[in-house]
Structures are given as C-alpha cells and as structure tokens.
Amino acid sequence: MFKIASLNKISGKGLDKLSNKFIQTDLVDEAQAILVRSQDMLNMELSSSLLTIARAGAGYNNIPVDTCSKRGIVVFNTPGANANAVKELVITGLLLSARNIAEAISWTKTLTTDVEKSVEKHKSQFAGHEIKGKSLGVLGLGAIGVMVANTASDLGMHVYGYDPYLSIKSAHELDSRVKFMDDLNLLLPKCDYISLHIPFSNATKGFIGKDQISNMKRGVCVLNFSRDKIVDELEILAALSSGHVKQYVTDFPNENVIGNDKVISIPHLGASTKESEDNCAIMAVEQIVDYLENGNITNSVNFPDCRMGICNTQGRIGVLNKNVPAMLGKITNALAELNINISDLNNRSKGEYAYTLIDIDSNVDEDALRKLHEVDGIIAVRIIK
C-alpha cells in the first residue's frame, strides 16, 4: 500500500484516479508520493520514504529538483494539461492591450452622472486597433506556445515562432501559417506583439533584457505568461517610460510593476480554471500511479521517460542511476551473479541521470538486491513487482 500526501488542494477528479493500492495521508513524512501545486518545497526536509513528487502544473521551480535527483526521487509535471487555459488568457491579454479595455473599464467605473453623454464624448480616448493583420512573435513553442501561435493565426495575425529546442510533437502541431525563425534577432523587429512561453531556469533568467528590448519594434507590446524572472523588469520599465515598449502585460504582478499605467497586471490566473485544475490533477495522479505500480516514467523533469507497460513476468526492477559509461553492463552483470534471468529491459538516459526497467523471470527480494545498491553510480533500486 502506498501513502500519498497533498500539499495543496487537489481536484477530486484527479484523486479519484488513485487505485486501491493508495491511501491518502496528512502525514507528509510517511508518504511515498506527494502531490503539489504552488506550495514552496525548496526548503522542505524530504523524508527517506519519499519516492516521487508530482506538480499539478507545468512549472516546477517550487520543487528542489537537484536534491530530488540525487536522492532518486522522481519529479513529474503536467505539460499541456493547462495549455488551453493559459492560451485563452494570453489571447485575452492581447485583446486587452489592443483595445485599451482595462483603462476603459477603469475610467467607466468613475462615472456617476450623465453617463451616456460622458461615454459618447470621451470614448475616443480609448480607441485601439484590431489584431487582424498585426504581427505576433511567440517565443517558446511548447504546448502553450503552439496553441497561442495557432489561435493567433486563426484570428488573422501574422505569427512568427522561435524555439531552439522545438520538439517533433510541437513541430507537427504547429500551424503551417506560422513562420518558424531560428534567429531571435531577426524575429524581434518584425513583431507588434511578443508573447513569452519560455520555461524558467538559471539559463533563461532575464532572457528578455536590454539588448532584446532595444531590438524590438518601437511601440511593441510584450506579454509575459511564462514567469516574471524571464524578463528584466527594470529594463522593461525603462522601455515603457521611453515609449519604446507601449505596454507590458504580465500574469506575475510584483512591487516593480504594480501601479504603472502602462502595465496590465493579472493576478496569476493563467491556469486558474476548473477545467485546468482537473486536467492537471488527473495527469499528475495517473503519472504517480503508473510509476509506483508499474515503474513507468512519463513527463519527469529529472529522469528520462521510460515505459514497459504492465509487468507480465514474475518480477520487475527499477534502477535509478547516474548516466555514466558502462553502467548498464554493471547492472546486468550484478543480476547475472544473483542468477536472475532478464526477460526484457528498457534503458533510457536524460542529462546526468538514467533509468533502467528490467523484467525478470523469477521473484527477488530486497536482500538479494543489495549487490546492486553497492554498484558505484546507482542511486536507488526498487522492486516493483
């Protein structure tokens, strides 16, 4: 029986996907699995019983991934589960900017008398423009970026896409009308709008800085529904002050941008829909269940995807290890010395780490597997069946 703890409120539609091999617990230190949304786990002490964490959402900068990797804790996220919700809000932000809707609504709330007369007299100050025929640059073509690009194309915009790590899946899903560009410096000057969909990491911190902003078309609108730290906000504020950037639309309000008339701040509503919360919870739970019951990994941020379906042999072993030469040979040799016959095997690597699923023709216990634990470079070994 596996114990699973939730650090945030998780949709019941997701929790309903737990099999009868799971029980929910409030005692986090006893849990083999943790479900989390926004709670900060960076300084949390992780118990020795913990095997996996699933983030019900795409971002995972609230999870100590490096520590988890070294401990053999598989961290999952749910890419694409909230993509439609974020896409709809991005398009909303784009229209809010184009039609000066936020300013117009704020002004309308100040009216007390002669409302109709005042509206007709002053509405021209909020006149905007249509987005049809305008140019949009989408930086980052993951699940959300592709949906934004495709929808903007449907709305009649000229769309340019940029992603140096474009996946085959995203390439297939990207509308043929979207012009893919591999040089950011050539894309930026073409666009009336720039929409950011880049995952946050140390490498992408301040990705949009002084040089990138100066290369943008004057009067551009920048939309950030990715992470606040993707943008150097001091530089964007300077560009707003000079008029080089017309407006900044962000889903991440903070002290830097609050109160600026040229910033539309939305209180982190990107994935805040019931549908999105349901989808993320369902995916997160299904990934945890499949990993703990079958050893399969799908959508891990620190270990490679590796699947062998449901085990139909006497047993299955999962080995998490460092991605170093000759490791697979060491694993199979150790099993051979234990007279364990391998019927099937799947080995995958991702960066510094690797994972091996092994179906065997005989039962095995933890005591017999101590030889594997002794192999240099192996992080964790688990008997799955």
Image (spheres, rainbow, N blue to C red):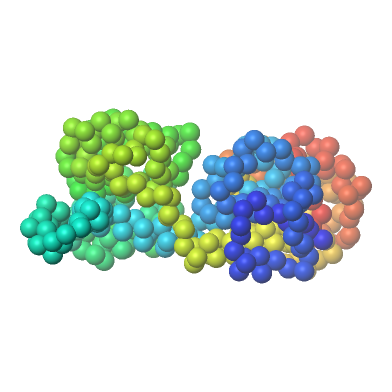
Q: In which image quadrant can residue 9 be found?
A: bottom right
Question: Is residue 151 found left or right of 338 in the rendered image?
Answer: left
Q: Can you say whether 332 is above or below 176 in the image? A: above
Q: Residue furthest left?
A: 121
Residue 178 x/y as whole percent: 28, 58
One can see residue 304 in this view = no
Residue at the image point whose x is 62% and y is 53% from the top: 8
Q: Residue furthest right?
A: 367
Q: Can you say whether 287 is above or below 65 in the image? A: below
Image mark count: 0
Residue at the image point whose x is 64% and y is 35% from the top: 43
Question: Is residue 70 found left or right of 159 in the rendered image?
Answer: right
Residue at the image point whose x is 75% and y is 40% from the top: 378
One can see residue 204 in this view = yes
Q: In the picture, which quadrant includes the C terminus?
A: bottom right
- Which of 263/111 is in front? 111
Q: Can you say whether 247 is above or below 6 in the image? A: above
Question: Is residue 367 found left or right of 383 in the rendered image?
Answer: right
Q: In the picture, which quadrant includes the N terminus?
A: bottom right
Residue at the image point whose x is 89% and y is 59% from the top: 363
Residue 331 x/y as whole percent: 78, 45
Residue 219 x/y as whole percent: 17, 42
Q: Can you say whether 213 is above or below 384 in the image? A: above
Q: In which image quadrant can residue 126 be found?
A: bottom left
Residue 267 x/y as whole percent: 41, 49
